[in-house]
Amino acid sequence: MILACHNINKSFGDRVIVQNGSFHIEEREKAALVGVNGAGKSTILKMIMNEEPTDSGDIILAKGKTIGYLAQHQDLIPHGTIYEELRSAKADIIEMEQRLRSIEQELISLSGDALENRLETYNRLQSEFEARNGYACESEITGVLKGLGFTEEEFSKKTDTLSGGQKTRVALGKLLLTSPDILLLDEPTNHLDLNSIAWLETFLINYQGAVFIVSHDRFFLNRVVSKVVEIENREIRMYLGNYQAYSEKKQQIRDARLKEYLNQQREIRHQQAVIEKLRSFNREKSIRRAESREKMLEKMTPVEKPMDEPREMHFTLEPSCISGNDVLSVEGLSKRFDSQVLFKDVSFEIKRGEHVAIIGDNGTGKTTLLKILNQVQKADAGSFTLGAKVQIGYYDQEHHVLHDNKTIFDEISDDYPTLNNTQIRNTLAAFQFTGDEVFQVISTLSGGEKGRVSLAKLMLSEANFLILDEPTNHLDIASKEILEEALNNYSGTVLYVSHDRYFINQTATRILELVNQTFVNYIGNYDYYLEKKEELTKAYASVPSAEKAGNSGNRAAGNASESTGPSAGAASSKPSALSWQEQKELQAKERKRKNDLKKTEEEISRLEERNEEIDHELTLEEVYSNSIKCQELTSERTQNEEKLEELYEKWESLAE
């Protein structure tokens, strides 16, 4: 075991983050820390790094082990270059090499014992240098930089000119090169393109140390981790397996707990009904049985009701009108910035009902294409045409559709003046903004909160063609799943840019990959893209070509359409004739039990009424003065009592 947290507690004022939380990480284990936004994931990492104190509990790092931490915000060496920043991670090895070169110069002028002593030092240093792979140091730095998506031309860029995303990539590369015994990574895939994420996955899978990751990238977690640590409702739980296994196991446990709770509640209600019925018989034996059942209920250990899932977004996307079949037609579109060509002479079409994902490396022009389609930027050449009755709803990852100086409430009310206050509040409540939260100013919101406001406006737009730029950025996993469901139930057309492979797999019916300044078309989801990528890229985008750019969509679509995945129904299996017969028999038995119970109750009622009649008759003078009549009635009542005793037991048995 390399890291252990025992009974840790942490609160900020009245807000409890974690209560008596415990988990551990084994050596070389790859584990994930998951939970909704605000659950306390980053706080736990900071407590492990002693950047945030615990209220109580123990955090133990194994003796002699080193730890490395990638935070969401980075502080880099001022005025240094990207290459110099990563090279600083190997400072001790570089210093060792300089000492070796220095000793080599000294050896020229030494002799005798001095030479022997210096040679001994040199040999010892050289052995350590080789053991630490010193000769491959420079190539290792270059490999990490390229793996994280930096070109050689960017190696000399000053770090203080980089964007936040680029700084995070530099910090990640530097951390990976230090090779600590355990890596703590907070959202490492943010700001990485698909190729860089795939490279990082391979790096971490083969990493010799342990890794503890906070991430909302489900595809990434499925590939890398073998344990999931969950923080939910202040509690910490551990699950073995990747994210998919965790998700299934968690649902199974919750379903089992809910079933156990509901079964117990059903049993309690049933026993209370039986007790009430037994007491209504008003017989000593029945009352004793009722009291016995009451004692049994008192001894029952109550099953706690599983807590409801954390509050989530609730929304649907529904177009106000149906567009024509031809939604978008792009012809000969080209765009460049200075000397950098993003794409040229590309043509493709989108039909009604399609869900098309655009993928590609960072900087290839995916977001630029969406901005051109929304007339935020102009193309250098070519044109595009929207079909009949097409109404665009645009989700911008930079949230330019929002106004920083407005409150959330005003943002909605100004754009949708026909909505009354109640309608606006109900809409915002569906996106987790309640009470005074609706009066927060947009500029004060986090990225995730701005994303939810943008999604609220998108829902209200009732557009039939959604153009989305990185819609899952800053969303937690639960919110991503809600967005996936909303898009899958959406009857309109969707075109989006995303690096979230799990999201693409769940929502895309077609993929356009922007590669070598052109688009390659794949009819299918991300799994299909992975299967066909090498083949279709070689065929249609091996070299930039205007002719291939114009025709790749149709020709690739022809290839792709021949290999659609198995139908959803193929995996389903019909219930066997035997299980159907058993079901019918069980239904018949249940009908018989209910009929028998009803008949028993009717017979009890009849005999109890007859006994009351006998009791009344025995008070009449003409009866109690007639010994024969009196004996007959007494005998009948005795027989009824015996019969009732049997019926009460039968009823109790049937009631179970």
Image (cartoon, rainbow, N blue to C red):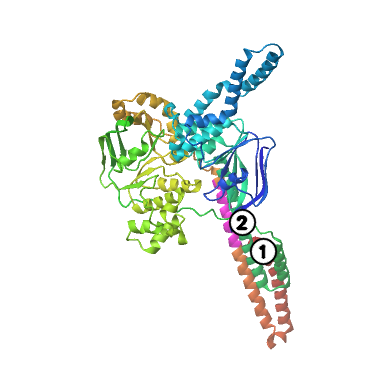
Residue 154's image quarter?
top left
Q: Nearer the viewer, mark 1 or mark 2?
A: 2
Q: What kind of residue is marked 1?
A: Glu
Residue 564 in the image, given as x and y percentages of width and height: 41, 33
Image mark for residue 652: 1
Residue 287 in the image, given as x and y percentages of width and height: 71, 71
Closer-to-camera residue (68/622): 68
Secondary element under disc 2, as helix, strand or loop, is helix
Residue highlighted by disc 2: 261
Residue 363's image quarter?
top left
Closer-to-camera residue (573/476): 476
Q: What kind of residue is marked 2?
A: Tyr
Q: CA distance from mark 1 to mark 2?
A: 24 Å
Residue 629 in the image, given as x and y percentages of width and height: 71, 81
Horizontal side of residue 591 vs 192, given as left or right: right
The residue range painted magenta reads 580-596
Disc 1: CA contacts within 10 A as few (<14), some (14-19) or many (>=20): some
Q: Earlier in the sequence, mark 1 or mark 2?
A: 2
Q: At 44% from the left edge and 47% from the top edge, which residue is drawn?
A: 483
Horizontal side of residue 603 vs 556, given as left or right: right
Q: Please identify the residue farthest to the front as the structure is shown.
A: 109
Q: Is residue 386 visible?
A: yes
Say above or below: 646 vs 337.
below
Image quadrant holding the C terminus, namely bottom right
Q: At 70% from the left edge and 11% from the top edge, which residue is drawn?
A: 112
Q: Is residue 588 magenta?
A: yes
